Image (cartoon, grey):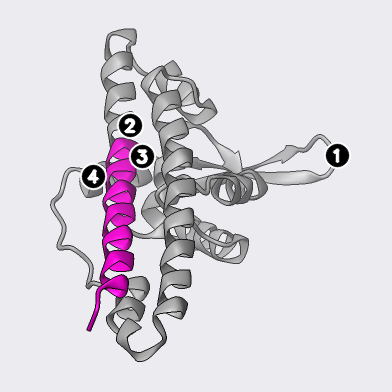
């Protein structure tokens, strides 16, 4: 997956300007892809030059013009083709697992503190993803409401369940990481 596909997926729900897209990605800590504003604007330029999105000028609330981006047929085709194709898993790059691999190099108290911070982060993410999952399950997020407005009512429940299921997977992964970190703390406490 790339930022290109994330942007196309969001724009498939509704047209947005760069600022709204940046706010969406910045406020969606519990989403599955993050990107800084600078990358978003750069990617939008690339997508527009590739003919995958198009921009129209609109007057904003503050009286300034804004470029509003929407998907072209080519962009929708690329997105749908990407979604319908199996892809190789990306190379593993797990910074925390790499760090944990060397916990034997530091005092147990230092490793324990790192693991406890990790657990707190995973609990917070688990809570955020649970909230997102539950909102999606009942079709209650702004972007999902936009997407459902353009789909047959008979598909709404299935679409909501599929989207909620993604975040259910995130919750489950976080729970496994919490259990793993607690086991690691127990290992730190074991005698030599």
> How dense is the environment of label 3, judged by Cα within 10 Å: few (below 14), some, or many (20 and up)?
few
Q: Residue at x 67, y 49 (%)?
A: 19
Part of the protein shown in magenta: 166-192
**Which of disc 3 and disc 4 is earlier in sequence?**
3
The CA span between labels 4 and 3 is 15 Å
Per the image, the residue denoted by label 1 is 62
Residue 154 screen position, x and y as percent: 28, 8
Report the quarter where the N terminus lies: bottom left
SS at mark 1 in the image: loop
Relative vertical location of residue 42 with respect to residue 10 in this rendering, above or below: below
Q: Which label belongs to residue 163?
A: 2
Nearer the observer: mark 3 or 1; the answer is 1
Residue 4 screen position, x and y as percent: 40, 56
**Which of disc 1 and disc 4 is earlier in sequence?**
1
Say if the magenta span includes residue 143. Answer: no
Indicate left or right for 40 with 76 as reference.
right
> How dense is the environment of label 2, judged by Cα within 10 Å: few (below 14), some, or many (20 and up)?
some
Per the image, the residue denoted by label 4 is 83
Q: Which of 134 and 66 is in front in this view?
A: 134
Per the image, the residue denoted by label 3 is 73
> Are the residues tagged 3 and 2 within 8 Å (C-beta)?
no
């Amino acid at each position: 997956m790339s930022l290109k596909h994330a942007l196309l997926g969001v724009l498939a729900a509704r047209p947005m300007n760069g600022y709204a897209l940046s706010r969406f990605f910045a406020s969606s800590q519990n989403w599955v892809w993050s990107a800084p504003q600078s990358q978003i604007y750069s990617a939008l330029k690339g997508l527009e030059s590739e003919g995958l999105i198009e921009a129209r000028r609109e007057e904003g609330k503050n009286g300034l013009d804004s470029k509003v981006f929407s998907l072209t047929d080519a962009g929708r085709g690329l997105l749908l083709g990407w979604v319908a194709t199996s892809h190789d898993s990306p190379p593993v790059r797990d910074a925390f697992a790499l760090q944990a691999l060397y916990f034997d190099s530091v005092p147990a108290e230092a490793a324990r503190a790192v693991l406890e911070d990790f657990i707190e982060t995973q609990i917070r993410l688990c809570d955020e993803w649970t909230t997102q999952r539950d909102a999606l399950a009942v079709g209650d997020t702004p972007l999902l409401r936009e997407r459902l407005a353009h789909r047959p009512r008979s598909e709404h429940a299935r679409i909501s369940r599929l989207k909620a299921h993604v975040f259910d997977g995130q919750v489950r992964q976080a729970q496994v990481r919490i259990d793993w970190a607690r086991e690691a703390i127990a290992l730190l406490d074991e005698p030599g």
